[in-house]
Image: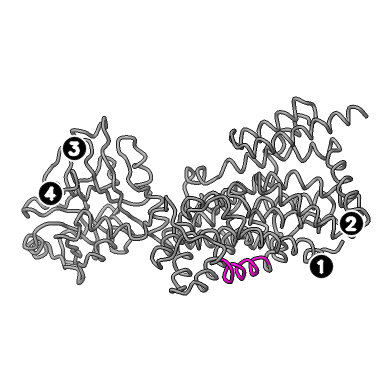
Amino acid sequence: MSLVMSDITITFAIVIGIVVLFIWDGIPVVLVALGTALALYFSGVTTLQESLGGLGDPAVIFIASLFVVSAGLDASGVTAWAGQNLISKAGESRSRLLVLMMSLVAVLTALISVNGAVAALLPVVVVMAVRLKRAPSQLLMPLVFASHAGSLLALTGTPVNLLVSEAVGEAGYPPFGLFSFAVAGLPLVAGTIAFVVFFGQKLLPTRSGRSLPPDLSQHARTLVEQYRLDDGMFQLRIRASSPYVGAPAERIELGAYSGLTLVSVQAADGSGRVRRPALADGDLLVVRGNADAAGALAADKHLAFRTADAPDDVSGTLFNRSSGLAEVIVPPRSRLIGESVFPGMVTPSGDLVVLAVQRKGQDTGPEETTLAAGDTLLLQGTWEALDRHLSDPEVLVVDSPELVRRQAVPMGAGAKTAIAVLLGMVVLLAANILPSVMAGLLAAFAMVLFRVVTVEQAYRSINWTTVILVGAMIPLSTAMTKSGAANLLADGLVHLVGDRSPYALLAGLFVLTAILGQLISNTATALILIPIGLAAAKTMGVSAQPVLMSITVASAGAFLTPVATPVNLMVMNPGGYVFTDYWKLGLPLLIMFGLVATFVVPLVWPF
């Protein structure tokens, strides 16, 4: 008996310790989580298998796979397309903008998680606020709070949903299905939107943040203007009678046409730079220089001028679904210093073309330039080539091609594939054809297999902090059950509510979860409270389903502090928020969540 009490004491000490460390925030959460698993093992509370088993838990693997699926939708421009189209329909109406924005983020959250949905829409919402002359602070907190409510629309909305569904199954009850959570989520999404529309303007501050995400939606137009690519730029279509038909692109020589530079050779189908061995009828030569020289070239080589050579047409030719532009700076001590470059030059890799060179903001012209520190080059190539070559430490990239593509190329390459993969995963989950972890892995595998994202992008997309946090904290739930700590706390909670109805138990669990969830990660909170809820349900003789669903709703109500979730913190600077702004709008919403968790949930899952 003393050994059992000792394990309980150790477990409580570890719980108190990690809560204090999470609140203090002086040690990375990953180290705190890993330290928890280590402490449980070295204290003898859990075995080696129990201490490390969480890292291989199916829920953890499913969470990691969802990050890859989310990255596929984001990288292919699906989320940017959805955001730009729906939010642009709001016009100047505040109410319409809030309803569309909050509905969109709620749906996206249900499919790709809170962090993915908010990260994808944050730049779009900031740009909309600026264009509509509205304070970002009036929109960004509603964006985040709607995503929290939206996390309760589907199993895939948050790691907490996955953990709770797994716990319900292990307790001997039917696991929650893909859309089971929507019973609580739909009224909460609707209620959150309604409350913000009617009361948000008074409860939210009117501020602009110190740091706003960059608006890269018109990036191509900006670069065309800065480098004056529309000045003397011509697009010439290769006719069937042209001697260039059947010739390799490398054979095009413009030396006989003084002052004329070949910028790019574009495929007729709009797929970007020609990669075929030979040119074909309809391919485009993009040249820069004197109009008379361009006319002479067209006459000699049987080329036709494009009917529209407007700047927008130039930017559309160089910047599209398959290819883009990137601006790089030559840093001090770069090996490129002293190298000679000129507009139209193909880089040694053969994948990129130098469109322009500037020094101190001035174009160096069509002649060769010897590079010096601080020179800027405008490069053009496929998005894959830009991603692959611009990680070179010899240049500094002004704007990441990956970030530019996500904002400026809605529904880009791979968008249809990404949507098909997402729908396939949803069907597998909804029909319960495969275990959730296998459906998630299959979707992540398909995103990489069909080249929606590269292997490197898939690695980068996974939020390893979340994955390790969940995996390393699962042993704590095991320890609380195994040591008897969960039963002890559950007995205390049941004693506190006394002979009152089970509704009092739900209310007590909601308050405990909600308070802890404002101070530490809601995922960590759920892992601590799940075994307590299961033990309390068993002690009181009620079903575990309403108890655990109540904990899920409470975990989603992380509104009162900026440190409650990563997305709360994500909008703090762009929105110019201070600590007290969160609870002013969040407290009424948290009360609404409490009412749903206590009185609506049992209507669907009876005690």
Q: Earlier in the sequence, mark 4 or mark 3?
A: 4
Q: Earlier in the sequence, mark 4 or mark 2?
A: 4
Q: Which residue is mark 1?
A: 603
Residue 69 in the image, given as x and y percentages of width and height: 55, 53
Hey, what amino acid is under mark 4?
Pro
Residue 425 in the image, given as x and y percentages of width and height: 61, 58
Q: Which residue is mark 3?
A: 371
Q: Nearer the viewer, residue 565 or 348?
A: 565
Q: CA distance from mark 1 to mark 4?
A: 74 Å
Q: CA distance from mark 4 to mark 2?
A: 80 Å
Q: Alpha-carbon neighbours of circle 3 within 10 Å: few (<14), some, or many (≥20)?
A: many
Any part of residue 431 in sight: no
Q: Which residue is mark 2?
A: 542
Quarter of the picture holding the N terminus? top right
Magenta span of residues: 188-200
Q: Which residue is mark 4?
A: 366
Q: Judging from the image, what secondary structure is the residue with disc 1 in?
A: helix
Nearer mark to the viewer, of 2 and 3: 2
Query: Quick check: marks 3 and 1 in contact, CB under 8 Å?
Result: no
Q: Earlier in the sequence, mark 1 or mark 4?
A: 4
What number is the disc on residue 232?
Answer: none
